[in-house]
Amino acid sequence: MTLVNKSRIDPHLEQIRAWTSEGKSAVEIAKALGCSSTLVRQVMKMNGIARNAAGFPKGTKLESRSKFYAHADQIRRWTDDGWRIGRIAKELGCSKQTVWNVMEKFGIPRHPKHSCPGETNGAWKGGRYFDDDGYVLVYAPEHPHCDKAGRVREHRLVMESQLGRYLLAEEVVDHIDGQRANNDPSNLRVFASNREHLAATLAGRVPKWTEEGKERIRQGCRPRSNP
């Protein structure tokens, strides 16, 4: 069923009122009715179906609110353990909006989106990950040079362990055998800059020019005729 305007939602006002009294969010109601959450909120506002500061609909019985307030300490513990709102809602048998209402009421901080750390993340694979370039990344969120996902390239961590200090941003760690996954200390060496790194690793190498590239070079080297 698709509700295209406010007039067609009028027959559902009592149902919307009942759903909000149960703690359902505008998003959940919109999904049930097949319309946008913006439309639901507009209709709620026009018909005096508002939510109070605690996040519960006006008219919700105090004992109904207290039922969930009683779980505030447990919700705080679950949140500290890395539980997401969806998981908490499923455990308590209520909506995610109700969980968020309780968290907001008692000042329980909400985890930023996609912030599950370490083992609490469903994609956790022991802390090691291969990037698209073949380098091994290690989960080290406390490292000052970690990326947004809290990872650092393993070969740099190994070299830092050998040096007893953090590497500078411009320093380059080279894999001697060319195998980026081989991060044994004996296979690593550090250069002060990428310029020094390239000078050492490309010395004596002959570029693999394509035939088209060779022809362009030959054309470019031919002496120009005098005008």
Image: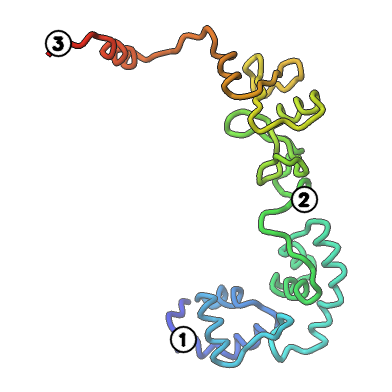
Secondary structure category for the residue under label 3: loop
Hey, which residue is sitting farthest left in the picture?
A: 227
Q: Quadrant of residue 153?
A: top right
Mark-to-mark CA distance, 3 and 2: 74 Å
Mark 2: amino acid: Thr
Nearer to me, 131 or 185: 185
What residue would you read off at disc 3? 226
Q: Is residue 130 above or below residue 206?
A: below
Nearer to me, 17 or 141: 141
Closer to the N terminus: mark 1 or mark 3? 1
Please report the residue visible at 69 percent of the width from the left and 73 percent of the height from the top: 97
Hey, which residue is sitting farthest front in the picture?
A: 227
Query: In the image, which is nearer the foreground, mark 1 or mark 3?
Result: 3
Q: Quadrant of residue 173?
A: top right
| Left or right: residue 34 compared with residue 175 | left
Nearer to me, 107 or 166: 166
Few, some or many residues within 10 Å of mark 1 (<14, 14–19, 20+): few
Mark linked to residue 160 = none
Mark 1: amino acid: Lys
Please report the residue visible at 51 percent of the width from the left and 80 percent of the height from the top: 39
Mark 3: amino acid: Asn
What residue would you read off at disc 2? 120
Mark linked to residue 6 = 1
**Residue 222 percent location from the top left of the image:** 24, 9
